[in-house]
Amino acid sequence: MSGDGDMATFRRMPGQRTEGRLITGAAISALLVSMPLASAAAETRTFDFDDFNEVDIAAGVDATVTVGSDFAIAVEADEKDLERLRIEVKDRTLKISREYRGMSWSDGRGKIVATISMPTLVGIEASSGASVVATGIDAGAFAIETSSGGSAEATGRCESLDADASSGSRLDAEALQCARVVVDASSGASVRAYADEEMTADASSGASVKIFGDPARRDVSKSSGASVSY
């Protein structure tokens, strides 16, 4: 009887483990099946806006900007998020975001990806969790502003850069080679920029600023746990 009892216990234990494997396998299978379905649900829409030289991206939208080509705008998202898309040109600025529903734009949100090309770019703004990656910049004066967890990356060249970052945002312009840069960073924001002649940096409230290019003229102000290096 004791042998039978041991055997019964042995049978139950593998049964429990096998059931666990089956459940895990089913969960993985369901995930793998759902992934192509989610991809298949994505749609791409194109827009015929032109006559803009700045971009303002907000509300968790991810944007890639290529400078030097004709105007073109394509946005990819699922149908539900495309219905919430807000896109317009105002004062020569292309603005892309999504409308608020309830207390936040992020309620039930999915990914919105914008691909933009334009002949000339002189300014970038990224806010509220949005991200902008811009390449091919060739400008005299250029401006970048990030806030509220937004991020911006810029590549190219300019004569002067005005960089403003706040509220935990990230601004990476190390690859945007400029002669002069003015940086204002606050509230935990992070800025990386390049200047080979002159830099002015004001950092406060835990912000961090790193300037590349070894500029000869430097004007630095920092407070409340902020840092500036060069």
Image (tube, grey):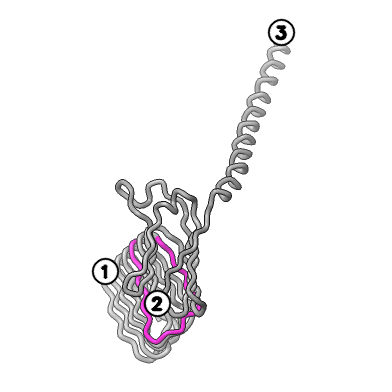
In this rendering, is residue 125 above or below 11?
A: below
Residue of label 3: 1
The residue that appears at 54% across and 48% down in the rendered structure is 41
Quickly name the residue at label 2: 53
The amino acid pointed to by label 3 is Met
Which mark is in front, 1 or 3?
Answer: 1
Q: Residue at x 43, y 88 (%)?
A: 196
What span is colored magenta in the figure? Answer: 130-148
Q: Is residue 136 left or right of residue 83?
A: right
Could you tell me the amino acid type at mark 2?
Asn
Is residue 51 visible from the viewing direction of this image?
yes
Question: Which of the two residues, 214 or 48, is positioned nearer the viewer here?
Answer: 48
Q: Quadrant of residue 150?
A: bottom left
What's the distance in space between the residues labelled 1 and 3, CA to CA?
A: 76 Å
**Quadrant of the drawing holding the N terminus:** top right
Position of 92 compared to 68: left or right? left
**Of marks 1 and 2, the one in the foreground:** 2
**Residue 91 percent across, percent down from the top left:** 31, 73
Q: Amino acid at mark 1?
A: Ser
Is 211 inside the magenta-drawn segment?
A: no
